[in-house]
Image (tube, grey):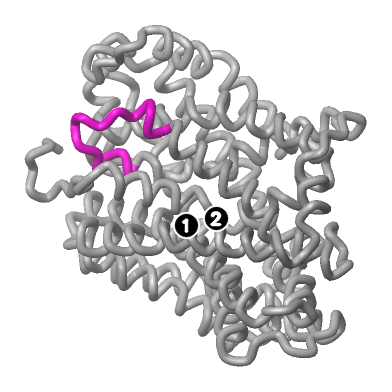
Amino acid sequence: MRLNDPAQPIWTSRFFFLMASIGFAVGLGNIWRFPYVAGESGGGAFVLLYLLFAFSIGIPIVIAELLIGKRGRAGSVGSMRALVKEESLSPLWIAIGYLNQVAALLIQVTYAVIAGWVLFYFSRALTEGFVQITPPLAAAEYEAITKNFLASLFWTSSSIFICGLILYFGLKSGIERAVGFMMPTLFFVMLLLIAFNIFAGGFKDALVWLFEPDFSKITSQVCLAALAQAFFSIGVAMAVMTTYGSFLPEETNIFSSAFIIVFADTLVAILAGLVIFPVVFSGNLDPDAGPGLIFQVLPVAFSGMPGGYFFGVFFFLLLSVAAITSMLGLLESLVRWVEIEFSFSRKKATTCVIFFNIILSSLSVGAYSGIVNWGNFYSSFNDRIDYISNQVLLPLGGMLIAVFVGWFINLKVIQKDYAVVDNRIFTIWKFFLRWPVPIAVFIILLTGVLPI
């Protein structure tokens, strides 16, 4: 697909591309999982490991994905097909594009349910607040929304519908307008909540929890956890970076863009800890609550803190924005694939993808609520999807992308076409893409599929 093809959308500016890419990378996992794992795994020592892996493993793959998209100009699958033809390679390599699209679909199916819960809690915070919420009451309310099939389906469908409404209007009138408003809002709300925490108490304890190095906790498993967190939080091998890369103008510097995306994603993960844990420590609550931290522990903290109503509203607004912008990327990659693969119009492709996602997500809702009993398979439906996508498809896709670009694409042509000024940067990127990245991601894949 040519750059001047009227059917090929192009980002209006680099700002919108970066906002959309950062919005996709910054998801719910950044805001609650990273701070929790960091504190549990050595604080500052874990953060240093995470930064090392994020920039040495994450950036090379992001650059590779953006290169594939920018050269192919046709989403994930179409771009792989274009490059395979251009380089006269085996058509089997096109499977990488399909692998990434399947991963995006499976992740979106379960992610939409969590996003629905976030929207419910935002509505709850806005209309009622968390007045006189005790730990048993918070746990009961969380169980009530997860077990209520119709209510959970409504909020899940709402999250998908909001994204569909944005995607329906295309790149410029839809995605760019949405991320141009939502991402500055996300950063503003995050800084506002951090400023509140500085004066509300618990901030010093949060700094110690997150940044005081405890190297005695650093084991091989912690190193692996930091590697996996860096790999998954950036969102590689989900077809999104390739799709967004296919919309890039010719003059865009993808090397610096990849650095900004990974830096911003990491910064948000760290700042999220300064949003969450001062509240936890000032309320003498358990910082090891894990997945239940957002929905069960924090509402109790909001109930007992001064200004808790406003903090709760802004906090779940922050989570809602993070959830929607991440879903936008996943759904856009699917919409673009349907557009190109079946020659559908934008509106028809969006309608089909949204309808299909609501149907699949209803299965995930049913598994959480237990409304349908299809035996052991269905009772662990979400666990199986999580395993297949996160433990198998993502590391396999990331490893294949690194091998494909690092060893089978003519990198001299890329270096010339993209006018890389500093040859040292290009050489370092090529080395990491060919050797450390495939090895590291292969280790993630092995630990995911083998009982080690």
Is residue 271 positioned above or below 428 on the image?
A: below
Q: Which quadrant of the figure has residue 373?
A: bottom right
Distance of label 2 from label 1 (alpha carbons)? 6 Å
From the viewer's side, name the closer residue of 2 and 48. 48
* Residue 375, picture quadrant: bottom right
As drawn, the label of residue 431 is none
Q: Which one is in front, 159 or 135? A: 135
Tag 1 residue: 326
User: From what the image shows, is residue 68 above or below residue 41?
Assistant: above
The answer to whether residue 28 is above or below residue 146 is: above
Answer with left or right where residue 426 lies relative to residue 303.
left
Q: In the image, is residue 304 part of the stretch drawn in magenta?
A: no
Residue at 63%, 59% (x, y): give it. 194
On whether residue 255 falls in the magenta region, the answer is yes
Q: Is residue 365 visible?
A: yes
The residue lying at 31 percent from left, 73 percent from top is: 165
Disc 2 marks a residue whose amino acid type is Gly
Residue 198, x across and y down, in percent: 70, 59
Q: Position of residue 404 (x, y in %)?
A: 42, 22
CB contact under 8 Å: marks 2 and 1: yes
Estimate how packed mark 1 is, as few (under 14), some (14 to 19) or many (20 or more) residues with alpha carbons within 10 Å: many
Stretch in magenta: 243-258
**Mark 1 belongs to which amino acid?**
Ser
Judging by the rendered image, the residue that carries numbered circle 2 is 27
Secondary structure state at the residue bearing disc 1: helix
195, 130: nearer the viewer: 195
- Residue 109 can be seen in this image: no
Is residue 432 rendered to the left or right of residue 125? Answer: left
